Image (cartoon, grey):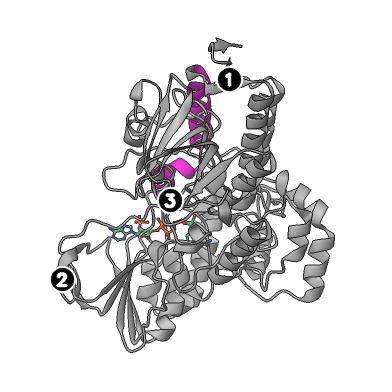
Amino acid sequence: MRITNEHQGEIVHVDAVVIGAGFSGLYMLYRLREAGLSTRVYETGEGVGGTWYWNRYPGARCDSESICYNYTFSEELYKEWSWSSRFPEQPEILKYLNFVADKFDLRPDIQFRTRVTSASFDEETNRWNIQTDQGDQVSAKYFITGVGCISTANIPNIKGMDNYEGELYHTGHWPHEKVDFKGKRVGVVGTGSSGIQSIPVIAKEAKHLTVFQRTPQYSVPAKNHPYTEEFLQKSKENYHSMRELMRNSVGGMAFKYGENSVLDHTPEQRREVLEAAWEKGGWAVLSAYNDLLINEEGNLLVAEFVRSKIREIVKDTETAEKLLPDHYYGTKRAIIDTDYFETYNRENVLLVDVKKAPIEEITSNGIRTEEGEYELDVIVFATGFDGMTGSLFKIDIRGRDNVALKEKWGNGAKTKTYLGLTTAGFPNLFMLTGPESPSVLGNMPAAIEQHVEWVMDCIEYLQNNEIEVLEAKVESEEKWSQHCRELADSTLYTKTESWYTGANIEGKAKGFQIYVGGYNEYRKICDDVVLNGYDGFTLVTGKANKVI
Ligand code: NAP
């Protein structure tokens, strides 16, 4: 069924509606279609790719090793695609997702340039009524969101923004054309993953770069390098073992965490382990020990190691001091970089501490902080996203009794899900990598595959057993949310303010909405729910609404 808008105004009936054509939407569509279910995917962008469609800023690349940063559901697909390097850049990842869309002929069921604006559950028909900004009206039995955890840009509300006469960009909504920094004075606001990836690249091209840093961040070298033919061949030969390792690992990647506690080692042994990890790059420092995120004393030792590296790299002592983070290592998303700290040794780069002297205003010429004005031709906001709930709340999703999801979740303050996939009062709604799933704490494609496969198995179960409605029980989500909170509180994550806790968004309720128990544990829990007959859900058969 090729999608056109020629029947605008008519209500289209399908089995499933999926929002988003990123990693999750594409695989969900593939699986639904394989199962013979009619499906429509709505995607705001003009092409597939999700995160990788929008985040086109200079230096954007993945931070999972590429041989794991792909689908593994199809051995054929895995073997057909070859990555150029350990951490490839955005254009290559976007190319991969286009390759997948072409290989499985997914585009005919995707309607691009279309935003789903609202969706409400009709208790009479047990179907979702969905509307888009293009006038589509769709009735679907299953409503599946693949909107991403970090896709709603956070553009800070700074006085005077409209007065600025230069060019203004956000890393998460980067133009498709190349932005020319040559001969220009550029300002980057924000030093999270996006800032740290883009700053070295922009610095090389711009006449001058001013970095406006609120919170210094830990970052370790990515040590990116091209892959050899031999390596690629071997990784393809090891497809099955690699897939197994990913599926049974804490973060969906093909490595294991160190076996020791940070405190098991003498200072000399620790230095040796961490130096080796630093040289290896990528996630090696974070995974060098088994208790970094639960052991306060151990964490501080590793944090001090990274700080010592920053002091070693950055030549100007005052700049180096400004760059030293003081939160627990890894409790803000760990970052890997290429020449980030080295960039501050360039003559054309200035670091401005906006915690000490906050930004007061965007003027027509640039940025004014409490300490003075910085004239800029270009401002880049690398200020992140309204994570986890932001994109869901942009859609007016209404469940039973016309209750809005945003209202039920108290604008984020009372978010409650069962397994991070479903929520009570919203039957047959599945949220891929939703709040309280482990998703963002690892390799997203691996998390996505597990979610899509669980949802697909569930839908097939419903179809095969003539079940009309699956709905999380209130007590199940209470229990799951509490479990998520207790787990998070047993770690250091909740001791640091970050986008994980919602602290980056002005006025957003704070709370840690991610399951921290690891992908492997989470998979077991989800599988057990199925083995126990969809334990924790209410299942309703037939039109007579009989509960089983
Ligand atoms: P982020 O981690 O939330 O960083 C945003 C930065 O902007 C922080 O330094 C923040 O400071 C600063 N900021 C926010 N509002 C500000 C304001 N009003 N004034 C001054 N500074 C402000 O966002 P991100 O860098 O886009 O990364 C978000 C997530 O996306 C990452 O954690 C990661 O999961 C994902 N990502 C991944 C990759 C990758 O490597 N594959 C690349 C990019 C993004 P505070 O820390 O003080 O809030």
Q: Is mark 2 within 8 Å of ligand 1?
A: no
Which label lies toward us, 1 or 2? Answer: 1
Name the residue located 64 percent from the left edge and 20 percent from the top edge: 466
Q: Could you tell me which quadrant the C terminus lies in? A: top right
The image shows residue 457 at horizontal and vertical percentages of 68, 33
Q: Amino acid at mark 1?
A: Gly
- In this view, the residue in front, 542 or 274, is 542
The Cα–Cα distance between marks 2 and 3, rounded to whole angstroms, is 47 Å
Name the residue located 41 percent from the left edge and 81 percent from the top edge: 203
Q: Amino acid at mark 2?
A: Thr
The Cα–Cα distance between marks 1 and 3, rounded to whole angstroms, is 42 Å
Residue 259, magenta (yes or no): no
The image shows residue 405 at horizontal and vertical percentages of 38, 32
Q: Which mark is residue 536?
A: 1
- Seen in the image, is 180 located left or right of residue 516? left
Name the residue located 34 percent from the left edge and 30 percent from the top edge: 404
Q: Helix, strand, or loop for circle 1?
A: loop
- Seen in the image, is 67 located left or right of residue 151? right
The image shows residue 531 at horizontal and vertical percentages of 72, 24
Eyeballing the image, is 89 above or below 159? below
Residue 493, magenta (yes or no): yes
**Which of the 4 image quadrants contains residue 235?**
bottom right
Q: Which mark is residue 363?
A: 2
Residue that label 3 marks: 6
Q: Helix, strand, or loop for circle 2?
A: loop
Eyeballing the image, is 115 above or below 120? below
Which label lies toward us, 2 or 3? Answer: 3
Residue range in magenta is: 475-502
Q: Amino acid at mark 3?
A: Glu
The image shows residue 162 at horizontal and vertical percentages of 17, 65
